[in-house]
Amino acid sequence: MFDMLFAGFGSVMTLQIIMLIAAGVALGLVFGSIPGLTATMAVAICLPITYGMDPIAGMSLLMGLYIGGVSGGLIPAILLKLPGTPSSIATTFDGYPMAQRGEPGKAFNYAIVSSFLGGLLSIIVLIMIAPPLGRVALQFGPFEFFAIVIFSLTLIASLSGDSLSKGIMAGLLGISFAMVGAAPIDAFPRFTYGFTDMNAGFNLLPVLIGLFALSEIFLAAEKKVKKGLNAKLAKVNYRVSMKEYMAQGWNFLRSSLIGLGIGILPGIGGGTSNIIAYVAAKSSSKKPEEFGKGNPAGVVASESSNNAAVGGALVPLISLGIPGDTVTAMLLGGLVLHGLQPGPLLMQNSGDVVYGIFAALLIANVFMILFLFMGMKGFIRLLSIPQHILYPIILALCVVGAFGVNNRLFDVGALLFFGVLGYLMIKFGFPLTPLVLGFILGPLLETNLRRGLMLSQGDFMPFLTSPIAAAFLLVAAASVIFVIYNNHKKKKGASVLDV
C-alpha cells in the first residue's frame, strides 16, 4: 500500500498537477464562500474542462475543488452568520457569536485547524481501509437507514433550548416543508395547491440562507445602525494556544469519527454530520448552556465533522461505485468520463490513478489550510464594513445564491418566505436548528420507510427485527427516555428551589 501511495505522489508531483490542485482549492474556496455556489456546482462547471486531461490531472483538479468547496463555507458562516454550504450550518451557531464579541481570529483558527485535521484523518482512513469499510456500508438497507434517521431525529431534543415542545414543533414544521413537492419513488405532487413551481419542492440552500441570513438582516433592521467593528478589529486576537487546541482533542476526534461514519453512509452527507457532531459536543459538555453563545467547541465539532465527511463519502464511491453525496455523484461522472469504472475492481485495474487521487487529496488539504490562513486577516476586515453597506450586499448575494441553485425565481420567493419565517420564529422563541434537521432528514425518513415497506411487502416487522435497525431504534428509545428523565429532574430541582 505504501509503495502504491509513494507512486501516487510521484504521479502528481509535477508542476502542472500541483498548479491544478492549487487552482482547484482556490476556486473551491470561492464557490464555498458564496451562498448557492457549492462544491457540487464547482465540480459540475469544471468537469467538462477535465475532458482533455489525463485521468490523474483531471481528477486532481476535481479533488481540489471538492476540498476547497466544503471548507469555504466556514468564511461566511463565521463572519456573516451565513452558511455558505449546507455543511457549515452548525458553524454559524458559535462561530458568528465569537466574531461579534471580537474574537473572529480565534474562531477562524479553530475552524481552519479543525477542517484540516478532520480532512486529514478521513483521507488517511480512506487510504487504509476503504475496501472493508465499503463492504460494511453495503449491509445498510432501507430498514437500517430508517432506524438511523429516527435516531437522528431524537437529537431535536438537544437542539430545542429551554422549550422541548417548541423544538418538537419546529422539527415537525421542517418535516412538513420537506414533504412539499413530488413524493419520493412515485413522484406524486403533494401540497402544491396547483402551482407547478412547487412540484420540485423547496431546495435546501434557499431554506438555509433564508432562515439564518435573511432573518438576521430583518433583526438587524430593527436595531440602531452600527458603524462596524473597527475598534474591536484593532485588538483582534489571532492566536490559539496549544493548550486550547489540546483541550478540544476528544471533541475533535469524536466529531471527525461522526463525520467519517455519516459520510460513508450514502445519501446523508455533511449537512447532517455537522449538526449531529454539534449536538454530540453540546450533550457531552459540562457547560451546554454556553453553546450558541460563542463556544469554540461548537466550531471545532462542526468543521472537523464536515471535512471528515469528505473522505467518508469517497469510501463507497471508490470501493463500490456508489456516490455518498451530490459532489461524489459528480465525481463518479468524472471517473467514468476518464474511462474508469468505480467499484471493487477499480483498485485492481487502475490502482495508479486511485493512489494518485489519494495523493491529490492530501496535497489539496495542505493548500486549503495555507490559503485560509493567508486570507484570514483579509476575511476579517469584512467586519469593519458598516452594517448599512454590508447588509444590502449580503442580501444581494443571498438572492443571487438562491436563484443560482436552479435558475428559477421561485427559489428567491422561497428565500424570502423562510427569511420571514425565521424572523418570526426567533421573535417567538422557537429554535431554528430543529426545523433544519427535520427538513434535511424528512425526505430520508420517508424514502427509506417506503422502500422498506415495498421490500417487505407492507410488513413493518423487518424494521424491528433487522439487527442493525433494532440496535439504532433501541438507542433512539434510550435517548428519548434520557431526555424525559433529565427534563423531569430539572423541573423537580426548580420546584425545590422555588419552595
Image (spheres, helix red, strand yellow):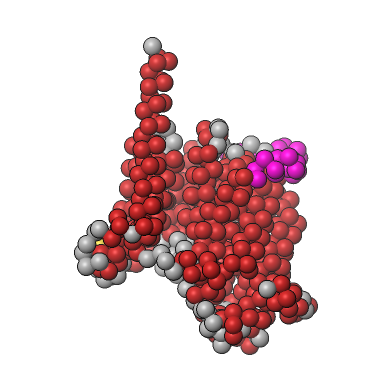
**Which portion, as a residue range, is magenta?**
225-249
The image position of residue 180, as x and y in percent, is 30, 60
Give residue 366's quadrant in the image: bottom right
Q: Viewer-proximal residue, 224 or 167?
A: 167
Q: Is residue 460 visible?
A: yes
Q: Quadrant of the N terminus?
A: bottom right
Residue beneath the point at 32% across and 48% down: 172
Q: Viewer-proximal residue, 211 or 469?
A: 469
Give residue 393's quadrant in the image: bottom right
Q: Is residue 19 visible?
A: no
Residue beneath the point at 50% across and 64% down: 264
Tell whether 125 sits left or right of 181.
right
Q: Quadrant of the C terminus?
A: top left
Residue beneath the point at 41% across and 21% down: 493
Residue that protrudes farthest toward the right in the picture: 15
Q: Is residue 459 above or below residue 222?
A: below
The image position of residue 68, as x and y in percent, is 63, 64
The image position of residue 225, as x and y in percent, is 58, 38
Q: Viewer-proximal residue, 233 or 10?
A: 10
Tell whether 379 sits left or right of 337.
right
Q: Is residue 44 magenta?
A: no
Residue that protrudes farthest toward the top in the picture: 499
Question: Count of labels shown?
Answer: 0
The image position of residue 186, as x and y in percent, is 26, 71
